[in-house]
Image (spheres, rainbow, N blue to C red):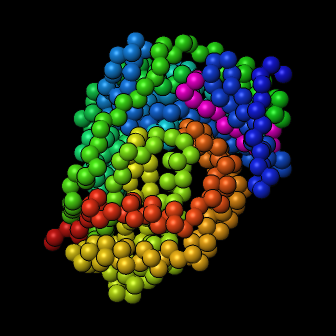
Amino acid sequence: MTGLELEKLSNLTLKEEVYRATLPSGLEVSFCPKPGFQKRYACYSTRFGSIDNEFTGSGGESLRVPDGIAHFLEHTLFETPRGNASDLFALNGASNNASTSFTQTTYLFAASDRFWDNLGLLIDFVENPCFQDDKVEKERGIIEQEIKGYDDNPGWVNYRGLLGNLFSEHPVRIDIAGTVETIAEIDTATLQSCYDRFYHPSNMHLFVVGDLDRQELFEFVAERSRAGAALGGELERKYPVESAEVFKAEGEVEMDVASAKFILGFKETGVPLAGEELVRRELLSDLGLDLLFGSSSDLFRELYEKQLVHDQLWSGYDTLGGVAYAMVGGDTSSPDEFPGRLLDGIESCLGEALSQDNFERKKRQFIGDFVRRFSSLEFIAHGFTTYLFRDFDLFSLIDLINGLEREMLEEHLRSLLDPDRHSIFKIIPRSS
């Protein structure tokens, strides 16, 4: 063995275990054994997302980089001296992808054969960037087309419109990919600067799951991963102070849609950046929104029977960088009437929807869904990484769910769904 000290995490209820170690470079590596699984899965992630556009440099100075640079950096890393990394994964029989969110960037692959070749490729292309002016210009054109494509997507325009309504200062209001104007400011020097700051091993995590030999895995990663240069001072992300009030109460645009699309959103500020309280807030929000707006809820049935909503209501909650937002939306033929009826329905249904019986039923459902998801290698890898970046252990989630109480949920929802902190955004069919 390489002399690494392995930490073992386990959960008897889930019958799962994870082994974790920190390399001398500062890189955290985790492994979840899944005997009998033919597929192996790995994801290499950094705590660098679209909202991290202002931070301290290596000398402690404050730096501001163009919006969309985390997503741009994700694109350019795939260009290697041996060719595009996706093509190289395909030659090895693996499927691969990458994604940038508000708070992190992840590179991943899944493979049944040639796992070690693919893991070496993943480590090599993420840890050895090759920024060249001509490749950066090529990616700029590709990302411009991607941005313009999203501008024609009604669902995305609706979602982005809501965030722009809710927030006045926080970078969550800016598209993850940036704008055509902001990505025009990105060059190789800026990319290298962000890479050096956010792709240091101590800011990253490699998670592997599958039927593998534990000792062989940790030895392989320790030998293949770079030593890592000094980070150069503490990395501090800087987020603007956001008002508790929404920026705009409502907004709408016309697009070529068959029926109107509608999103109602609620804004939260002063949210913890990480830790158990943050995760509990997310659980309460997800559970409560499902109780209020799910397909079995009284409120959805009432709105559906009155033909105010088509098919379904969808809902969601997200926390990032000290702020959060809850949202509920759907398609409607009555865009003027629907928002008011939905707001009225939330208040009238809060008590009945949150009865003890409904609460216990939904909590059991959440626990069952959580346990079943451990049959997915993707869920295990991304779940552990996401919660690790929030200073929380995925295995502890089931205990946190068990500890939720109905009174706790009602108090949280009445605060979250405050009608004084709501905004509305609609996509209206284009006038002929």
93 with respect to 288 (left or right): right
Q: Residue at x 30, y 36 (%)?
A: 240
Figure quadrant of residue 317: bottom left
Q: Where residue 345 sits in the image (x, y, percent)?
A: 35, 77
Q: Where residue 66 sits in the image (x, y, percent)?
A: 31, 30
Q: Where residue 354 sits in the image (x, y, percent)?
A: 50, 74
Q: Nearer the viewer, residue 245 or 161?
A: 245
- The residue stretch that appears in magenta: 201-212
State which quarter of the image contains the C terminus: bottom left
State which quarter of the image contains the N terminus: top right
Q: Nearer the viewer, residue 243 or 190?
A: 243
Figure quadrant of residue 376: bottom right
Count the marks.
0
Q: Where residue 39 sits in the image (x, y, percent)?
A: 74, 47
60 with respect to 95 (left or right): left
Q: Residue at x 54, y 22 (%)?
A: 200
Does the segment drawn in magenta span residue 211?
yes
The correct choice, above or below, for 116 with respect to 112 in the image is above
Q: Residue at x 25, y 52 (%)?
A: 245
Q: Residue at x 72, y 28 (%)?
A: 21
Q: Nearer the viewer, residue 407 or 279?
A: 407
Does the segment drawn in magenta span residue 117?
no
Q: Nearer the viewer, residue 5 or 405?
A: 405
Q: Is residue 386 visible?
A: no
Residue found farthest to the left: 432
The correct choice, above or below, for 405 with respect to 182 in the image is below
Residue found farthest to the bottom: 305
26 with respect to 60 (left or right): right
225 with respect to 307 (left or right): right
Q: Is residue 269 visible?
A: yes
